Every structure is written in C-alpha cells, then in structure tokens.
Amino acid sequence: MSDVNRISRLGMVNAYLVSEDDGLTLIDTMIGGSAGKIIAGVKTSGAPIVRILLTHAHGDHVGSLDALKETLPEAEVIISTRDARLLAKDMSLDPDEPKDKLRGGYPGAETKPDRTVDPGERIGSLDVIAASGHTPGHVALLDRRDRTLYCGDVYSTLRGVATSATVYPRCPLALFTWHRPTELESARALRALEPARLAPGHGKVVESPLEAMERAIARGA
Ligand SMILES: [Zn+2]
C-alpha cells in the first residue's frame, strides 16, 4: 500500500511530503496561495519541513516557494543546477540545447536556492533522476525505500497516465513543454526505472504504473 503523503488542490496540482530521519522533504510548492494548505498538511504529520525540493521552475511548482520560505526560513531550498537559472529568470539556453521556445510560466522567485543538485545525486532517500524535456533542467525523484517515483510533469495522471510530450484533450501539459522529443526520452528513462508507483505533479497517485506508462509512451511516439 502506498503511504504517499500528497497535498493537492482539487486533485489538479500536487505537492508531496516525504518522511526522512531528520524531518520532511517537501516536493514542489504548487501555485501561489498554497502555503497555508501545505503547512496544514505538515501539522498532521508532526515533523517539520527541513527541505523544499523542486522538480522544475514552472509557476505551478514554485508558486508558493517565497511564502513557504518566509514561514520556514530554516528549510533548505533545492533545485537542479539548470532550472535554478530559470528560477532566477535567466531564460538563456545553453549552446548544446535545442533552440525551442521555453513554454509555460516561469515567474521566478525571490528565494535563492540554498543548494543546487544534478542527476545522480541523492537527497535523503531520494535519487535525483535526469528528466529534461518539459523544462531543460526538470528532475524526477525516486524514493529508494519503496520505489515511489515523484515524476513532476514528465507524466501527468489527470486524464489517465500521459506524458507531457503529447497534447491530450483536457490535459494540456504538453503545451508547456520545452522540447517534446527530449521529454519523450525522459518518459522512457523513467519507465525503465520500474517504479512501484507514480506520484505526479498533476493528478492522482497511480500504483503499479508500468503498463500505463508504456501506453503513454506509445501514444507519444
Ligand atoms: Zn510544468
């Protein structure tokens, strides 16, 4: 059984609390105005948020970062090295990156990350997994203890399991994807990790998601 601790606004936009020995890791901060809901979610779990870990710099994931950091000044804010630039509103692309337009909202934040990470690093029980495509520096987080995959926007489960490489009716996530071929490669790489459950930025948590992930990849290919 999943003991994934999801905080959600109407099932549409999610954040997650991951228990570690030293407290809680908050994955993503949802849209602006969500800090109160997140803090209320923490109260029931009884441990403090010691770090705030961002999958990517889109506004519906970093929207409540500043408000949370004000309430929780001790919490360590962590984002990938690449998306830290987008959080600082530096919209430049690297010479080796596709020259596609950066899509979706990048509102930035006053808060500066305390730490930047790269794929291959580990944060508590979470492995940082390369998942570029939706944004240049998007990362996913795999919990080594139970193989829960916090996939950010590589997959959504709003209208069934879907990648953000393909536009589906009523699941417009791909409209905000920077480079769809790279995103589809990341979707494949995440499937290869054989997660036990998928905990996305948008939609419900899905148990035993491998076949649904494969179908989503096939639709996008
Ligand atoms: Zn996004």
Image (cartoon, rainbow, N blue to C red):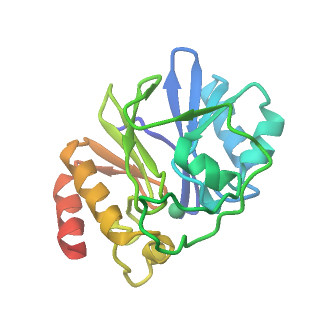
Residue 1 seen in the figure:
no
Q: Position of residue 205 (x, y in %)?
A: 39, 51
Residue at 51% in and 48% down = 55
Look at the picture and state if 146 lies above or below 110: above
Q: In which quarter of the image is the C terminus?
A: bottom left
Nearest the camera: 38 or 113? Answer: 113
Q: Position of residue 70 (x, y in %)?
A: 83, 38
Count of labels in the image: 0
Q: In which quarter of the image is residue 44?
A: top right
Look at the picture and state if 96 lies above or below 111: below
Residue at 26% in and 59% down = 185
Q: Where is residue 31 in the image (x, y as percent from the top left)?
A: 67, 59
Residue at 37% in and 41% down = 129
Instruction: Give the farthest residue toward the top.
Output: 21
Q: In which quarter of the image is the N terminus?
A: top left
Instruction: Give the farthest residue toward the bottom.
Output: 169
Q: Position of residue 153 (x, y in %)?
A: 44, 59
Nearest the camera: 31 or 175? Answer: 175
Instruction: Give the farthest residue toward the right.
Output: 70
